[in-house]
Image: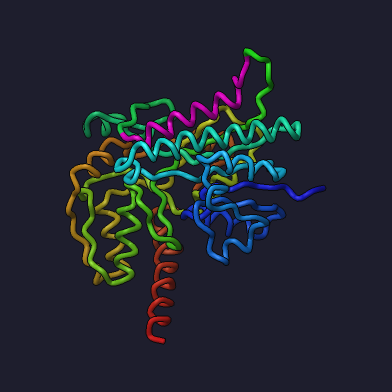
């Protein structure tokens, strides 16, 4: 039996690094793509790394280069995140929508060539939800997959559009011509992801990891949202595990193509209190940014992930307390202790 080949786009990001690490012991061949070369410790785990034009999901060169490999699964992580997308919506639309369309076309092409279905795993987001007011957000409580789909950011609009594109490619592709769909699209609507291993890179939910990393470095932090701000979060290892778990789920078990997943939903004040418990000298103040605050206020306070729990057994391993005690604090402490040791040398 040949080794399955997996494509990971946007492999240079937080989740890409974590996903490649998680697949290190699996019997798979990884083809990774990114605009820039990957760090050597990540690249050495891959059979090929495509970068530059070949790693740009918006470039036709990407499709040509990736099509040279017998890819069976695609983890499409390449995206412009929420805050950066608001600053340059045209570029974000090109990457987030046109790039996803290229990935779906690639999957259809490969499925046709090899006469099989190509599974596409797509990280979506709670930014697909939108509320006109905080009162509406509070009244709704935990959102289900079909609730409040009125995104107010380019990031959320693009992700929702791509979910619909994925459903189209899985179920309705070129039905007038009679061509068989070859894409098995599966999406997870992620809450804010907190990683101890990589630095935040422009997400609107990044106030949580920024707060933690600043405290571990001994630096003051001005949080850009109010203390009462509430959205759902998840530890990065659970996010990666969810992607892999959904990727392995038998298609007959799935009742939908797009799933919520959740873990914990603290307020910003509760996050700050947890950080101070472990870093008593942490200097954290709240200085809300009116624009970023409005974005977070439009997102849900929590998610109902009962469909994922029922269909494919989703269950987070890290609740709020365990995420800090067993994953975040030990890892960031080691990270910055090693930096200090290197600097002293």
The residue located at (43%, 46%) in the rendering is 263
Residue 12: image location, x then y, percent: 50, 55
Check if residue 317 falls in the magenta segment: no
State whether residue 258 is above or below residue 177.
Answer: below
Counting the numbered discs, the total is 0
The residue located at (26%, 69%) in the rendering is 219
User: Which residue occupies the foreground of this view, 344 or 57?
Assistant: 57
Where are the magenta residues, as a range? Answer: 153-175
The residue located at (37%, 35%) in the rendering is 156
State whether residue 68 is above or below residue 322.
Answer: above
State whether residue 162 is above or below residue 31.
Answer: above
Res 317 visible: no
Residue 327: image location, x then y, percent: 45, 62
User: Which residue occupies the foreground of this view, 281 or 172?
Assistant: 172
Check if residue 155 falls in the magenta segment: yes
Horizontal side of residue 14 vs 135, given as left or right: right
């Amino acid at each position: 039996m040949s080794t399955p080949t997996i494509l990971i786009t946007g492999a240079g990001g937080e989740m890409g690094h974590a996903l490649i690490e998680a697949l290190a012991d699996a019997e798979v061949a990884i083809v990774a793509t990114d605009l820039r070369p990957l760090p050597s410790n990540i690249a050495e785990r891959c059979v090929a790394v495509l970068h530059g034009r070949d790693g740009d999901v918006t470039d036709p060169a990407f499709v040509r280069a990736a099509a040279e490999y017998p890819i069976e699964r695609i983890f499409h992580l390449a995206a412009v995140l929420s805050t950066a997308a608001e600053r340059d919506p045209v570029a974000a639309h090109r990457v987030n929508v046109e790039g996803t369309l290229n990935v779906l076309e690639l999957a259809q092409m490969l499925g046709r060539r090899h006469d099989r279905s190509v599974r596409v795993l797509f990280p979506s987001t709670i930014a697909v939800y939108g509320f006109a007011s905080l009162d509406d957000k509070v009244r709704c409580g935990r959102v289900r997959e079909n609730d409040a789909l009125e995104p107010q950011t380019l990031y959320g609009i693009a992700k929702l559009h791509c979910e619909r594109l994925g459903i189209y490619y899985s179920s309705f592709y070129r039905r007038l011509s009679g061509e068989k769909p070859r894409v098995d699209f599966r999406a997870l609507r992620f809450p804010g992801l907190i990683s101890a291993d990589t630095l935040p890179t422009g997400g609107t939910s990044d106030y949580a990891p920024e707060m933690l990393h600043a405290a571990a470095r001994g630096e003051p932090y001005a949080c850009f949202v109010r203390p009462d701000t509430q959205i759902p979060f998840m530890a990065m290892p659970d996010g990666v595990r969810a992607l892999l778990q959904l990727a392995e789920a038998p298609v007959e078990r799935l009742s939908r193509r797009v799933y919520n997943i959740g873990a914990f939903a603290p307020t910003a004040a509760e996050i700050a209190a947890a950080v101070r418990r472990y870093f008593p000298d942490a200097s954290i103040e709240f200085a809300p940014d009116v624009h970023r605050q409005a974005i977070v206020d439009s997102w849900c306070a929590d998610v109902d992930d009962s469909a994922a729990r029922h269909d494919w057994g989703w269950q987070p391993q890290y609740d709020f307390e365990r995420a800090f005690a067993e994953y975040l604090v030990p890892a960031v402490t080691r990270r910055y202790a090693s930096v200090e040791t290197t600097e002293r040398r």
